[in-house]
Image (spheres, rainbow, N blue to C red):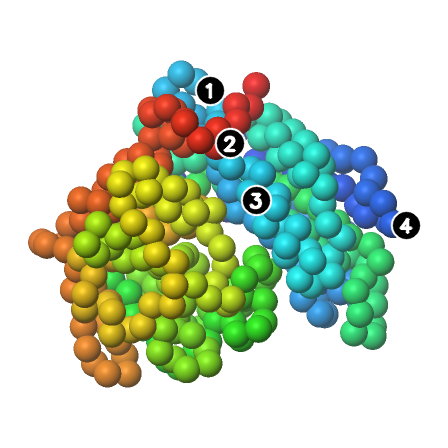
Amino acid sequence: METLDWKSLPFGYIKTDYNVRCYYRNGKWGELEISSSEYINLHMAATALHYGQEAFEGMKAFMGKDGGIRLFRWDENSLRMKKSAEGIMLAEVPDSLFHDAIVKCVKMNKHFVPPYGTWASLYIRPLLIGSGAQVGVKAANEYLFLVFVTPVGPYFKELFKPVHMMITRTFDRAAPLGTGNIKVGGNYAASLRALDVAHHQGYASALFLDAREKKFIDEAGPANFFGIRDNTYITPESHSILPSITNKSLQQIARDMGMKVEIRPVPIEELETFEEVGACGTAAVISPVSLIFDEATGKTYHFGENDQPGPISAKLYEILTGIQMGDLPDPYGWIEFVD
């Protein structure tokens, strides 16, 4: 294994030693297989390639100060993958298989878990694809469940420093009754052009609006949106938003901090009333937002003071990452240790 500069890791792919695979054939799941290959032998007519029968998850393993490796809320990832499977007619992965696969993959690559204090982690990518061949538009009869891991740094290179975002009305991420609420590749493919435009204009991400009326905030690129006002944590409600496990966790922490939590449609006009704004998700945890530019109206919204994270966002970030890395107690039972 090459020596890695743990503190300078990108949020990208670095080869690790092993991945874990399992096939669904003849109506049942087989045994876990261990592979050192980075490639999949896939039929050219596989439904994943032609009809988008593909779902994935993103989660992390963290090294604590005590040397223990921690998984965060894996059961929520397993549940979300089941919902994705139901949404596009994939074979559902049982919780036991999901758990066994991620634990085995982390254990076999444990020397790639970044050390405590580097703000890096081991990213875990469970992948479920239609591997069976079909030419007509229908579900496959064979599926592949695969888990690989890779060490990653922060999603936004700014770490916990505020970023700037741009509202896009030119592109939609997902249709109102489409697949926006499940974690499938098509949603991310649909976001790529908007993200590319935002990046070329100097923004960290694009902020999508609802596809029906373009009046309400939807997703913050690859993350959920939240705003803080009057000791209230406010996050959008929409069928086209992916339910973020990080967002769900932050809501619980906010309640325990004595805050009110509101999950409801958030009109664009409400932006100017927020004291703090952030994007949250597995990759970024929390990315504070200090500026949002609306490309259609030319209006710019500012949050916080002196381009610094707001105090509530900072406290939420401190508590959640503290639980994940073992610096704070876990009163919720969110952490599982990998031996």
Q: Is residue 76 left or right of residue 25?
A: left
**Circle number at residue 26:** 4
Q: Which residue bears the numbered disc 2?
A: 71
Q: From the top left corner, tell me how far across and down residue 162 is, in percent.
A: 22, 53
Visible in this render: residue 315?
yes
Q: Which percent across, then down, holds residue 117?
A: 32, 28
Q: Residue at x 53, y 75 (%)?
A: 175
Image: 109 above or below 264: above
Q: Earlier in the sequence, mark 4 or mark 3?
A: 4
What crowding class fits label 4: few (fewer than 14 Cα within 10 Å), some (14-19), or many (20 or more)? few
Q: Does 174 appear above or below 89?
A: below
User: Cα distance, mark 3 to mark 2?
Assistant: 11 Å
Judged left or right of residue 188, residue 39 is right
Give the Cα separation between the discs numbered 4 and 1.
39 Å
Residue 66: which quarter of the image? top left
Residue shown at 83%/68% (left/top)?
134
> Residue tagged by mark 3?
77
Three-letter residue code for mark 3: Asn
Answer yes or no: do the residues labelled 2 and 1 have beta carbons within 8 Å? no
Q: CA distance from mark 4 to mark 2?
A: 32 Å
Cα distance between the residues tagged 2 and 1: 10 Å
Tell me: residue 316, above or below residue 114: below
In x, y percent, where is residue 122? 48, 35
For residue 210, which numbered disc appears in the image? none
**N-term mark: 3 or 2:** 2
Which residue sits at x=63%, y=57%?
A: 84
In the image: residue 104, left or right of residue 276: right
Q: CA distance from mark 1 to mark 3?
A: 21 Å
**SS of the residue at dot 2?**
strand
Q: Which mark is residue 68?
A: 1
Q: CA distance from mark 4 to mark 3?
A: 26 Å
Q: Secondary structure at mark 3?
A: helix
